[in-house]
Amino acid sequence: MTNTIDYQQLWNACPWTEMFFGRGLRVSVDGIVSLNGAIARLETGPSGAVGLSHSEAGRSARLTSAVNPAAEDKNLVERCAPQANAGGVLCLGLGLGYQLEELARRLGPDEPLWVFESRPELAAAALISRDLSAIVNRPGFRLFVGPWSDGEKPFAPEDFPPSQILWRPAAARYFAEEYPWFDAPLSAARPKPAPRRVLLFQSGYYLDRELSNAAQALGLETAVWNFQRGETADGNNFRELLELIKNFRPDMALTVNHLGFDAEGLLDDLLARLGLAVASWFVDSPAFILGPKRPGQNISVFSWDGDYLELLKNKGFSTVKHLPLATDPAFFSADGQANPARPLAFVGDSLTMATAKYMLKLGLRAENKNFSAFLDKADKLAERFLANDDLLPDPAALEKLAAWAELELTPEHLSDLGALVTWRASRQRRTHILTELKDAGLTVAGDRHWAGLLGLPPARLHPPVEYYSELKAFYQKAQVNLNITSAQMKTGLNQRVFDVPASGAFLLTDYRKQLFELFEPEREVITYQDPKEARSLARWYAARPAARESVIKAAHRRVTECHLYKHRLRDLLQTMDL
């Protein structure tokens, strides 16, 4: 968002700027600049609220909420719960001063309220940004602005500082070493920032367990808003959500695939009014999830596939980030390995029922007139979709097919038709590659429709494998685990890329460009470009345990060090300024 703040005008109007004379500050169009070039900026966020950020030596950090800094500081004070008539409060970090107004309401009229701000540029930015006269003129208020010499106490020896300490989280996170150590009682344990609180939207859906485990690993406090899969927020569960937010006071909410959001935008509006930041992580095509309504500006979105970032920006999201999938060592680890007996294995659905689901949604049944002709046309569109780099089937071709099938040209029908063609494309791709690899000792675990599609003997057809309790052992029993990426991921990565190496098993995956942003080719990941190369590589590695083991060890190390869900959640929190 363009910053249109006139710093010089604010500086000239502020009655407190004299305290900064001689400190080397200067006012520029970019912000308040310190002697060493650090810049404090006031930035208008998506909700219109002004926040504070800081940049120095190539590092930038937002120091207040981008959505509602006042609510952020109110929640901070409520969590710390300082007591009145208990010696006052010493606040480390000025922020924009919202916490001081909340503290002033809680303390007695003459109780000490001291503030230490190590950076003069931040103190100046705060004082010019808001009218803090009522705080500055309050009896007992004192502001100490750094920098301070090593060991220097910024107050006189006869002064006795307030006994209760409140750390602003940004001060503790970025500038803790710049604050002096005090004599007792202030030199007792330096308080840690309050645990970050995350409200998880869950319904037994993909990644629920993984994100809960990741939050626990990062020391987050979590609460869960549960509802049935496919259900969206309405008047009934709005009341439950409001009560949960009131009692838990989260710093942000986190949902997967926009779970819980309604087409009318009621939940968007509610969370925007509450000033609650939301992170929505798409792990499947957002084109088949999002409706036409523009999203709330408090919602940041993350995509498992970097190719979808432009689509999400065009949908109206202001913060859009690439966040690949990962794995959870609670479910996929290298322990319990057995000697792999299967030369080659694939785990996955034939997608027969997925395509049938969308045909039923469109009112298409086998007994319908021209049903076979419709499928032929849909499959030709699927072939074209597989052959190009587009993320979605051709809209004009979809409209033409819908008109031929006498379907209503509604956005919902066209979206369902696009999903049908996408699933048919993935089905074609899987069937084609697996057919080519039948003579490489292939075993397929999946639904009953594979028997008719592949013609494999019963001994090489395995029933569906339960993801959390059975899949790791299945991977470990195969010499080579084959991965076939779905059609909607033209360069992106699916879950198997991370789960197989985490299990201490060998992966052979189709070439995807985004792989090499996360893995070193040939050393940590082996790829194929076409079915013939896949067959050749599968046979080669199945016959060479030492070559497999070298890749397995390197890939396992990479995944456990860089690609766990706790790593992804940490990155997400940094984007959300938490």
Image (spheres, rainbow, N blue to C red):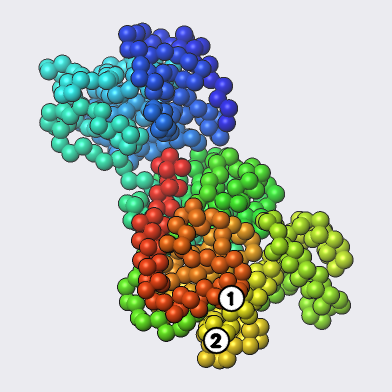
Residue at which label 2 appears: 461
- Residue drawn at x 69%, y 64% is 386
Q: Position of residue 403 (x, y in %)?
A: 86, 63
Distance (Cα) linking label 2 and label 1 = 12 Å
Front residue of 577 and 202: 577
The kind of residue on which mark 2 rests is Leu
- Res. 137 visible in picture: yes
Say which label, 2 or 1, has the lower sequence index.
1
- Residue drawn at x 29%, y 24% is 118
Total label count? 2
- Residue drawn at x 25%, y 32% is 177
Badge 2 crowding class, 10 Å Cα cut-off, few under 14, some 14 to 19, many 20 or more, is many
Badge 1 crowding class, 10 Å Cα cut-off, few under 14, some 14 to 19, many 20 or more, is some
The secondary structure type at the circle numbered 2 is: strand
Residue at which label 1 appears: 349
Front residue of 85 and 172: 172
Q: Position of residue 553 (x, y in %)?
A: 36, 66
Quadrant of the snapshot with the N terminus: top right
Quadrant of the snapshot with the C terminus: top left
Label 2 vs label 1, nearer the camera: 2
Q: Position of residue 129 (x, y in %)?
A: 45, 20
Q: Name the side, left or right, on which 138 lies relative to 291.
A: left
- Residue drawn at x 42%, y 84% is 341
Q: Position of residue 33 (x, y in %)?
A: 41, 18
The kind of residue on which mark 1 rests is Asp
